[in-house]
Structure formats: structure tokens, C-alpha cells
């Protein structure tokens, strides 16, 4: 599902415009932008004016600068892409429907229409459009309720909040869940220390799950079936006990499905450390077989056979296999084009190991194939030395390694500009910290937050910052 599938036509076009502008390292010509979004000059000018007006009303330090031939976006370094797009997204009727059903999961169509202050006919048309977009998640909305595998409903909400909501909006959902004590339970049971990003991921899932407890007649049959190969595995029992310990805090009628839904998330969303990921793969089953299959195929595409055994590479194989095993669907900012060789790897795993039909590529299989393609590029890159400007990147280890190598390749100017992994104890040693998370400035050291995974916009801004540092 593309983000634009949940927006009206005008908001979707504005979203596309912002996405394109943020990917540019230089001002883009008016004609090129018109061609990319397929609208007239008059319509484009109107949308640009509306976006600038919107940012003024929201008091966001961002604006789109235009001259007769070129356009560029100027924004405060602390703003994220979601911050810039949130004013477009929050008024979407589809977004309101999805939010409403999380907080009130058993409404009639009449109650939904009344709450949203629209007619039942308008709601009916909106649900037809929304259900079409939800097909890849194997879920639908009918008679004021979600239908389909419960883990898929929660996974959709996780993707929905993660891609649509800025950090300050997400805080309300995670804060309401009051989860600090719960996070400590998982850290203790899994013998690990969760990073800031991991804590935020788990907090979001737990917050969504608590709201979903009010839904009647949840369907866990698919998930229970997928856990059957692992019911006697010691490592899975450890996670089972951690989840059980968390859930018994609440007066719930527990069933296996509720436990398995949280287990599936913990196992597949980069929450395990390297050692626990190795344990996951060490007990066999379809996930381990899929990971081994990916390893063998990637090995054939790389110039360094032994490199695929590095722990961060094995971690990527394990997490990609687990996500593909338990979940379906993905939300994307823009369409991705799958590399045919890597997509073929995913097809082999789906058909020969998971025993599922692979009719055509969808967003999750394309996303996994993109991860594998990034992994192949990573393994084929020459090793890089350590550097000096503080770099703090949290989240997917493979993507972060690629981003760091891109920063080095594009911006390194030895011996003048060098990089090193950010160390909290060395704040005063840095002239600049580059990060992908919210990190407040300290001791007058400037912090630059990366805007997007492509980093083309970021390179332009960072080159200006480095020029000021040097001259």
C-alpha cells in the first residue's frame, strides 16, 4: 500500500510533490516537477502556494522557494518528512476511519458515519476504496469491525502509525499505554538492553495491542498454525514466558493467539540482539530454512563468500525471513522497483519453504527483495576506515551501514572531514553529530537529523555545513 492510497486526490498530489522535492540535492526545474506529478503549471503553482500557506498556519519552519524556472524546499534541520506531511495526512477521511476503529472497535456504520459527521453513503464509498487498499494486508472493514487475521490488523496499525504519524503524535499512543515497566520485563526475560528505537517500536505495538483487546471475536487461526513448528523449541518458550509475564498484569482472558501475536512481532521487527537472532535460527524450522536459502543465493551474487557469515548479515537474513513468515503487506512512501534476481530469491522462499502461492510481487516481497539487494551492495563495497564526525544511526543495521558508507563516500575529505561512531562521552570532541533520531544539541554541538533514506537532500545541506566548518 502506498501512503497516497489513504489520501484524497489533492492531498496525494501534494504528498508526491513534497516527496520529490525532498529527494533533490539541487533545485528541480518546474517542467520536470510538472512531468513527474503530471499536472499543469497553473495547478502546480496552486499546490505550492497551498503547501506554503499550510506551513505558515502550522508554524513549521519550512517553505517551498520558487523562481521562474526552478523549485526547492527550505526547512529547519530538525523537521522530519513526517512532520512536513502530517498537516496533509491528518484530515484524510480514511485516516479518521482507521483511527476511529482502533479506539471504538465495534461500531455500526450508522454510528461511524455519525461520529465522522458524514452520510452513510459517503462512508460506504470510502470503505470500498479503503478495503481495496487493505487487500494486501488480507484484512477488511465490514459492519464497523475489522475482519481478517488479528496479527494482520495490528501489523497494519503498526505500519500505519509508523509511516503517517510524527513523533509527537505517536507519543500520545505510547504514553497512554504506560509501558515502561513492561519494557523492563522483556529486557529481563530476553537478557538484552533495548535501544531507543527498539523501545519505541515495542511501545507502539503494545499500545496498539491494548486498544485491540476490546475487539470481539478476533481471528488467530493463521498465526497459531504458523507457530506449530516451534511449540517444543526452548528459545521460543523463553519468549512465550516473557509475553505471558507481561499479559498477566492485565485482567485478560488469555489465549494462545494473544501471546503469539506479540511473539511474532518481537521475533520479526529487529528487537532481538545478534545472539538471540542466532538462537532463533539455530532451532531449525521454516524460518531457519528460509534464512539459509537467502544466504546461499546472496553468496552467489557477491564477491566475498565469507562475508555473508558476518553477524550483521546473518541478522538481516533472519529478520527478513521471520517478517516474511509471519506478516503480509507493507506501507511505502513511493513505489519501489524490485531487482529481478532478489525478487526471485523471495519467490523461491515463499513457494518452496513457506509453501505459499507467489502470483506476483507485492509491497512486502518487494521490500524484502530491496533489503536483499541492499545487502548484496553492502557486501560488494570495499571496506572503509573509521571516521571522525559523530554518526549515530539507529534501526536496521544493514541500511545504517549503507547510509554511513554513503556519507563517507560523498562527504569525506581527509584529513579535513572524518567520521567516527557517536560516543555519548565525547560530545565536546565533535563539531557536528549526524543522526536519524531526535537528539537534542548539547554543549553547543550542532546536531543534523537525516531527512530521508535516499539522503540526496541531506547531502546538499551537509556540504553547506561542512563548508562553514572548513572556511
Image (cartoon, rainbow, N blue to C red):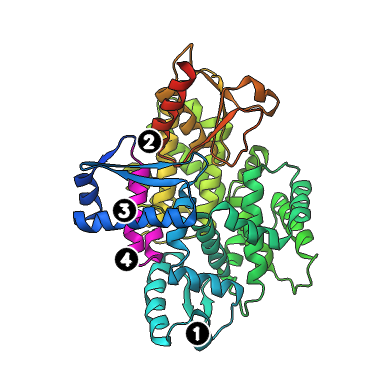
For the question of whether residue 213 can be seen, the reply is: yes
Image location (x, y in percent) of residue 39: 21, 57
Q: Are marks 1 and 2 in contact (CB under 8 Å)?
A: no
What span is colored magenta in the figure? 1-24
Q: Earlier in the sequence, mark 2 or mark 3?
A: 3
Q: At numbered mark 1, what does the secondary structure look like: helix, strand or loop?
A: loop
On the image, numbered disc 2 is attached to which residue?
A: 456
On the image, numbered disc 3 is attached to which residue?
A: 48
Q: Earlier in the sequence, mark 4 or mark 2?
A: 4
**Viewer-nearest of labels 4 and 3?**
3
Q: Earlier in the sequence, mark 1 or mark 2?
A: 1
Image location (x, y in percent) of residue 411: 43, 23
Q: Are marks 1 and 3 in contact (CB under 8 Å)?
A: no
Q: At numbered mark 2, what does the secondary structure look like: helix, strand or loop?
A: helix
Separation of residues labelled 4 and 1 (CA atoms): 26 Å
Q: Earlier in the sequence, mark 4 or mark 3?
A: 4
> In front: 340, or 438?
438
- For residue 9, the mark is 4
Indicate whether 115 appears above or below 162: below
Amino acid at each position: 500500500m502506498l501512503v497516497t492510497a489513504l489520501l484524497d486526490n489533492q492531498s496525494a498530489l501534494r504528498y508526491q510533490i513534497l516527496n520529490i522535492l525532498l529527494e533533490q540535492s539541487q533545485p528541480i526545474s518546474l517542467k520536470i516537477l510538472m512531468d513527474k506529478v503530471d499536472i499543469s503549471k497553473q495547478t502546480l503553482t496552486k499546490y505550492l502556494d497551498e503547501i506554503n500557506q499550510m506551513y505558515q498556519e502550522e508554524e513549521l519552519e519550512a517553505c517551498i522557494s520558487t523562481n521562474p524556472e526552478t523549485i526547492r524546499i527550505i526547512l529547519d534541520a530538525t523537521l522530519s518528512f513526517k512532520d512536513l506531511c502530517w498537516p496533509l495526512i491528518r484530515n484524510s477521511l480514511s485516516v479518521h476511519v482507521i483511527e476511529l476503529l482502533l479506539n471504538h472497535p465495534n461500531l455500526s456504520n450508522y454510528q461511524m458515519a455519525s461520529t465522522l459527521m458524514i452520510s452513510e453513503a459517503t462512508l460506504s464509498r470510502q470503505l470500498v476504496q479503503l478495503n481495496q487498499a487493505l487487500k494486501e494486508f488480507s484484512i477488511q472493514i465490514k459492519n464497523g469491525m475489522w475482519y481478517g487475521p488479528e496479527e494482520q490488523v495490528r501489523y497494519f496499525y503498526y505500519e500505519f502509525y509508523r509511516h503517517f504519524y510524527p513523533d509527537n503524535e505517536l507519543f500520545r499512543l505510547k504514553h497512554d499505554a504506560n509501558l515502561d515497566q513492561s519494557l523492563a520485563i522483556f529486557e529481563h526475560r530476553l537478557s538484552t538492553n533495548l535501544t531507543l528505537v527498539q523501545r519505541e517500536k515495542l511501545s507502539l505495538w503494545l499500545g496498539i495491542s491494548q486498544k485491540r483487546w476490546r475487539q470481539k471475536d478476533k481471528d488467530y487461526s493463521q498465526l497459531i498454525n504458523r507457530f506449530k513448528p516451534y511449540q517444543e523449541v526452548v528459545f521460543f518458550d523463553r519468549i512465550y514466558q516473557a509475553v505471558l509475564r507481561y499479559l498477566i498484569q492485565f485482567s485478560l482472558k488469555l489465549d494462545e493467539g494473544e501471546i503469539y501475536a506479540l511473539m511474532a512481532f518481537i521475533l520479526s521487527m529487529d528487537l532481538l540482539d545478534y545472539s538471540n537472532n542466532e538462537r532463533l535460527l539455530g532451532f531449525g524450522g521454516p524460518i531457519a530454512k528460509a534464512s539459509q536459502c537467502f544466504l546461499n543465493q546472496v553468496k552467489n551474487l557477491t564477491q566475498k563468500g565469507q562475508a555473508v557469515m558476518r553477524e550483521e548479515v546473518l541478522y538481516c537474513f533472519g529478520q527478513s525471513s521471520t517478517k516474511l513468515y509471519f506478516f503480509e503487506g507493507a506501507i511505502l512512501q513511493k513505489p519501489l522497483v524490485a531487482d529481478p534476481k532478489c525478487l526471485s530469491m523471495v519467490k523461491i522462499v515463499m513457494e518452496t519453504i513457506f509453501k505459499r502461492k507467489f502470483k506476483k510481487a507485492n509491497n512486502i516481497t518487494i521490500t524484502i527483495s530491496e533489503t536483499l539487494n541492499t545487502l548484496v551492495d553492502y557486501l560488494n563495497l570495499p571496506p572503509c576506515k573509521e571516521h571522525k564526525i559523530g554518526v549515530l544511526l539507529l534501526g536496521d543495521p544493514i541500511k545504517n551501514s549503507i547510509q554511513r558508507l554513503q556519507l563517507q563516500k560523498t562527504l569525506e575529505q581527509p584529513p579535513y572531514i572524518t567520521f567516527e561512531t557517536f560516543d555519548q562521552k565525547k560530545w565536546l570532541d565533535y563539531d557536528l553529530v549526524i543522526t536519524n533520531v531526535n537528539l537534542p544539541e548539547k554543549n553547543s554541538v550542532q546536531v543534523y537529523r537525516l531527512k530521508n533514506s535516499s539522503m540526496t537532500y541531506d547531502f546538499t545541506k551537509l556540504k553547506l555545513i561542512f563548508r562553514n566548518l572548513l572556511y
